[in-house]
Each structure stands twice: as structure tokens, then as C-alpha cells.
Image (spheres, rainbow, N blue to C red):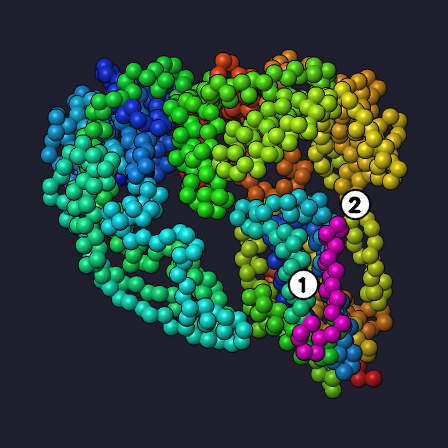
Amino acid sequence: MNIRKITLVTCIAFTGFQVTAQDLSTKIPAQAKLVVSINNKGIVVNSSPEILKDALINFGLYKDSNSNLTKGLQSDFNLDKQAYFYYTNTDSIQYVGFLAPLKENHKIKEHLFLDYDVLPSSKNYERRVSKDGETQVAWDNESLLILTGSLNDDYFRTEEISERFGLEFVSNNTGDWNYNEDLAVAADSAWATEEESFIEEPSATYETVYVQESIEEPISATEVEEAWETYEAPYVEAVAEAAAEVALDATYELEYPEVTEAEDTSEAYEDEWNWYSHLLSPEQEAKNDSIKKELFKDWISNDFSEYLNPENNLGKNSAIKISKNNHLVRIWVPNLDQLYGDIIPNEIVSMVYNLDMKNLKYGYKDATLDLIQEQYNLKFTAKVNVDDEMADYLKTITKNNFNKKLTNYIPKDYIAYSSLNISTEEYLKQLPKFITRWYMPIVEDEFFGIIATALEITLDEKAIGKVAKGDNLLFINELKKVTKEYVTYDYDEDYNYEEIKETKEEYVPDYLWMFTSEDQRLFKKILEYAISKEQIVFENGIYRKNAEYNSEDIYFLFKDNIVFVSSNLDQLTAIKENRFVNDTNANLKKDILSNPFNVRIKTAALLEITTKLEVPVSLVNNESLETLSEYGDIQVKVSKMKRNTIHSEMSIELPKRENNALQYILKNLFTETNLNSINEL
Amino acid sequence: MIRLKSLLLLIVTISCSFLLTGCFDFIEDINIKSDGSGTIKATLNLSKSSTKVASLMKLKSVQGMDIPSKEKIQSETETMIAILKKTEGISNVAYSLDFTKYIASVSCSFSSVKALNAFSKTIASHFKTSIEGSNSYAFNAKTGVFSRSFTAPSKLNKEYTKISETDKKYFDDAFYTQIIRFDKTIKSQGNKSAKISSSSKSVLLKLKATDLVTGKTTLQNTITLNNK
């Protein structure tokens, strides 16, 4: 079953209409490493079946609205319960499961999985399996489970495991690389002589026979479990041997790259070099693929019954259950560090960077991410719990008090702003500990311990903290018109020409950056030195760094215990002369003062900016640009730690064309044109 | 043109990849003596778009279109210069790249138009272009007839047609200028867009780059010199 079909089933599930009792969370295995909860009811309540259907048609999933499939799907799924995706992963195999609630008298059997093979019913469950054996399906009166997945290739990349399953093995150790002498000589020759040469590689022709027979005597999941644990179970070996035999008997039609041009020989040589060194040959790959395919089919087949009714499940886990209608989707991760470790290609990172990422433990624990709709506002919130050590670290560096005086200089017409408040003093104090805990384990080099100790001894954190406290506020102002110089040509009557300079007006964004500094001596000394070198000019209490060709001047101002850096002289002069007109937005000030990190972009201003900056419309979607003026602001904020939890939020206010944000997305963003544009990317 | 057409193509390709940096001047200044030898200087001036070019060069690619880095441009230019220096009949090769004003120029002497054509072919081959067949120079010292053929590179036209109408207006300030000077006076020239200088020894052809790319105008010309 492909992703598109699963998506179809998921989406169609939103259009059902009946209530039943049991929540499907009892069918999610406890070892799930990620769960996506879909609030069907919330989604339909906030949109409508018609809008969803139109969106699905645009999405290309609902092409034939009169088909039995479509008609049936609308009446088979139960709206009042959540649907779930989940992900499990062991060292050898990963599964993705989809659980959908069904109505009591559903007719799934007549509408879906018609091209799947029928398996014997088991414990009131109808069973189906895809033709390739890689997707298992089962349903009863109230739920549907679709389970698919893949093997973890890393697991098979050791000699021991390869041997166990009869796989071909080539070491990644470069010392073991094979070297194709013929190709090397040919390539050298080609480079040396720059003459055409011809290299003939041996070619082999085989026929391919795919494995069509499955192992006749399936065994229980428990037996397979044991086999995995011991790597010695006869069943696993039988699977491997059977697959290997078929693969060895298989014939393949293969062609080695043919090298005909001298200039291409070196490239071919490079390809061949890699090919022969740290990759398997095509026939070896084919054999391994065949074995692995058989393994996967049998493993999923034997695991499925356990996944259908997992004894240890998440039924009592409240974190995956959505209780509010405006919470549309929830993603829950029980251990973020572990999931991160699973996703990182450890072997590759280890080979390329010599880092052991498995030892990287940030201290992240469970995480909950919610997609929330508040009328026209769409929010994506994240709550991440961390361990005590990480919590202490984050609390320490973010306990910095933001200098309230900075909020007296908020420009009225800013386009975007960002604030960052991390205590420099505490950060430096924590740095050695940070290096020791987080980085030393992955580099496995005591040298980093020396660096950490050296930093601890040599840095005067308090003094540096006075130079830059760590509270920063950056505003991108409105665009300003500037005069730019360019070179053109003047021709005389005989068409001799000389360069002349002309000017033109352009718009550039300007900025205002400020931060607290209780000890400004270092900055002033640097600027005084630059003045002596005629790089900086000091006029009317403001330092000006002369612009290089066609760039903008940069101005520096020291006022009270604040350092201002800006490309806007008028703004700095107004600050200096106490006539700066401040934006009095209370919410803005509150965000800046209370959150360690904020970003806010005035989306509506982007259209004017792109026009004035002459950004080619081809670079962005023209239609999207025009509607930007209807959008509210985009905001990202990270709050201070509460207990051991990090809270962050990203939000955007969508145009008020429909009843709510979800309807706007489904009707206006999920258009055929937009989806085609996305596909083209 | 003086087969710096290949160079032109390289430079225009680079500037095209700056997608709508818009304003640029390309000037090709050729001096041809009666014996067919001469000099050429090709200049690409992007200074009017310098802000945009500077911004774009900070990106690796825009919508899948690669933006060459300063180092890449430098390296490609040096490769091209090395090839140029090895080309028979080409001498006094010089170049400059100004990444402040965004002006690039290449100049050289050639012993005959044939040398220029050979140079052009070499460069075209190096940069895997296919313009050498449709753009070439010829000069008959006996009859005093100088001619050049030209076919707009279809690849550029194809790329240009992909650009939206709104964006095409940014190319309005892009010009291709060709100046050809002789040591004899000009009897006639065959390009309706070209002008002969007051001394009658030079021909100026200044065309909008968009017209050239789309085939509305051409660089093709036959110039007949007075045999005095």
C-alpha cells in the first residue's frame, strides 16, 4: 500500500459520521516511538465534508467520485474517534501503522483492498496482504489497521549479521577496498595522453527470477522474536537460506558501464573505483535485496498479530488523546533523543565525521506538538520535557533579565524583529560543562576535555558578561531609498568610449540592532582605533563607518548602557536626542521581556518589499504574493522553562475569507494550481 | 563576432543565472587591420545591478538555478584565459574581474580572423556550447569585405521564454553593444540597426539583449571597406 493510498484512507476517514465507544489508543503498541493523533471530529467540525472532498479532489486522491471506493469510504469511517499513525523501530526493522476508527456496519470489505490477497480471518479480524507482501491489513467491527514498513539497512552492515542471513558483505574499511587495476591504468593513461582510449569491461548476462514462493510454514511472532534475540533460530536461517538459494539461482541482466571516450574514462574510473571498493556489485546487491525482501515479508507477517492487539499498549496514555475540537493534530514522541538517534544515519556520520552520534544525549525526553486552530489563527505549539541537567542548564542561561530600556526603542514601522536573551555570563560558565556532557561523548577525544578546562580557567565570565549582557533586539525597518552609483559608457563621434559614473535610486532595508553593555570600553577603543586609521568618523556623538563601494554606512551609538548599531542615521540621531517615537504595543513589549527568543514578521509588508526590491516575481508564487497583504503576522516564540518543560509556539494569522483558518487552507491553499506548483518543486 | 561569441555566451549564461539581475551592458570592441589581424576587448558590465548581483551571489542557487560563486567565476575565467593563451594566433591576452563594481573584461590580439574563429571554437568546446557553427567571422583582405554570421542561441531564447512577462521588463536595460573599427573607411554596411561613425571607420551596433535573444534583431552584418 503506498503512501498516497494511506493518505486517501486517512483523509476520507474525516468524512464519517458515527459514534462508537472504544478509543483506538489501546491498539497502539507501547514501544511506538512516534504517534500522530488526528482529531477527525475537530477537523470536520472546523471545515465541512464538502470542503474536504474538494481538497481531496485537488490533491488527486478523489478522482472518481462515483466509484464504489469513494461512495463506500464516506460511510465506513467513524468521525467521533481519533485516527492514529504510529512509528516503531527496532535495530532491524521499522513499522508505520495507521489505525482508523470504523462504523459498526461498515463495508470496508467491498470498498477497499480489493486487489489485496485474502488471508484467513483471525479473532474476528478480516485479513488482507498486499501482493508484494509488504503491507498487512486487518479490520473488525470498529477499527482498521494498516501496517507497513522497511528493514533498517544499518543492521545488516556488519559481517556477523550478514553471515547470519546469508548476505553478501563488503567492509566499509578503506583498507579492505578492492582496486580495479585495469581501470586505474586506463584512467591514468587517458589523463596522461589525452588521447581517446577504449576500455572494455566484462559484461555478464543473467536472467532474473524473482522469489515468488513464501516460506510454507509460518511461525509465531514469539518465535521470530526469539530468533532475533539469539540470531540462531533455525527459522531465520531457513528464511535466509531459502532466499539466498533463489537469489543465487536468479539470473540478472546486467551491464557494466561502457567507457568509450578518453575524456570520460577518468569519470568512469572514479565511478568504478567507488563501485568496486565500498559498494557491492549489482549481482551481490540483487542477492541481498532478494534475501532482505523475503525477511521483511516474513517478519511483518509474523509481527502483525502482535501489532493488531498489542498487550502492552498506549491505552492509558493521555498524551496522545486530543480533548479539544480546535486541536486538529497532535504529534507525540516519548523520547526525542532516542528518535533523533534513530533518524540520524549514525554509520555515515561516523564514517565521514568520525563522530559517534549514538552517544549524543541532549537530555530531551517526551515531546508533544499540537496543530491548533484559533479562528483565523493557526498555531503549532511544542512542549518538550528535558532531564534535570538540561533543565538546569537552560534555566540558568535564560534567567537573564532583559533590559527594559531596550523596549523604549521599538520602531513604529518595522517589517520584522527578533529578540534573543541568553545570559552571556551564565552561558560562558556553563560552556565547559556543556562541552563535557554533550560533545565529548560523541567525539571521544580527551582533547575536548582540555579545551573545556582551559575555558573554565581563562574566561572571566563576569567581565565578558558586562561587555555584552546577552539581551539583543534587532529590527528590520521599512525600506529606505538610497542613491547607488554605477558605471556606464559615453561614446564620442567615432565610437570611442570612456567609463562614466551615474547614479540611480534603489531601496534597501535598514536595521536597528541594540544590546546591553555595562562596560563599553572595548567597543569604544576599537572605534577610536578605526578613527585613527580613517575607517570611522565620529560626528555629533555618533560613529559612522564609511561605506564601501555601493554599500551602506553603519552607525554606532552608545547611550546609557546600550549599544546601538544601525544603517539609519535618522533613527540613531532621534535616539540620541531623546525624540525617538516608540511603538507602544504592550503585547510586543511583553513578548520581548518575557521570552528568551522571539521572531515576528509582518507578512502583509512582504508584497511591497518584493516590489521595491525588484525581486523577480518568478522567484515566488505571484498569486501567493498578492494575497500576502491579507495575512497577519508570522510569529515564533520560545518561552522560559516551566519546571522541566520547554514551550515554543509558531503562529500565523490567515486571511479572513472563510469561516476559519482550516477552511481557508483547504479552499485556497489546497488548490490544484498550488499543489501542482508544490509537485514541480 | 569575433568569436568571442563563446565568451559572450559564457558571460551571458553567468548573468542569466543571476536571473533577472536585469541591467547589464555587454560591449564588444574589435579593431581589424587591413591584413586581418587586430585586437578585441569584451566587457560585461553588471554595475547597474550590483546590489542584486551581490545579494544573489550570497545564494548557492535560486529555484534550482545555480548561482556561481566568486571563486567559481574566477576559476572558470582563468581556465578560459589559459585556453585562449594556447590558441594559435592569439596573443596579449589580458583580463580583469571587478567584484566590487561587477565589471569583467577580456582582451587579446589576433593574427587573423581565422585565429579568432579557432579560438571561438576552442572556447565553445570547453564550455560545451554549440554556437560555433552559426556564428563566425570572415574577412577578405583583397576585396575588403568583412562579414559575420549570427544565429541567436536557441537555449537562451528557450530560457528567456520561461520568464514571466512581469520579470521580462527587468531586462529592458540590458544592452549588447558591438563596435568594429577598421583602418580603412567603410563603403557600406548591411545591418539596419548599425551606424557608421563620422570618420567612416567604425560601425556601432547597440541592441537590446532581449531583442537579440528572441531573434528580433541580429548581429549579422556585411561590411565593405573602401580599397584605398
Camera-near label (1 vs 2) is 1
- Vertical order, A624 against A496 (above or below): above
Query: Quick check: do tags 1 and 2 share a chain?
Result: no
Q: Is residue B18 visible?
A: yes
- Vertical order, A177 against B165 (above or below): below
Q: Amino acid at mark 2?
A: Tyr
Res. B118 image quadrant? bottom right
Say which quadrant the N terminus of chain A sits in. top left
For mark 2, does the 10 Å Cα neighbourhood hold few (<14), some (14 to 19), or many (20 or more) residues? few
Q: Is residue B206 left or right of residue B162?
A: right
Residue B5 in the image, given as x and y percentages of width and height? 65, 67
Q: Is residue A38 left or right of residue B171?
A: left
Q: Nearer the viewer, residue B27 or A133?
A: A133
Q: Secondary structure at mark 1?
A: helix
For the record, the magenta segment spans B85-107
The residue singled out by tag 1 in the image is: B78
Q: Amino acid at mark 1?
A: Glu
The residue singled out by tag 2 in the image is: A549
Residue at (57% x, 33% y) in the render: A449
Residue at (84% x, 37% y) in the render: A530
Res. B205 image quadrant? bottom right
Provide the chain ID for the residue under circle 1: B
**Secondary structure character of the magenta stretch overall:** strand
Res. A591 image quadrant? top right
Q: CA distance from mark 1 to mark 2?
A: 25 Å
Q: Secondary structure at mark 2?
A: loop
Residue A576 among magenta residues: no
Q: Nearer the viewer, residue B182 or A365?
A: A365
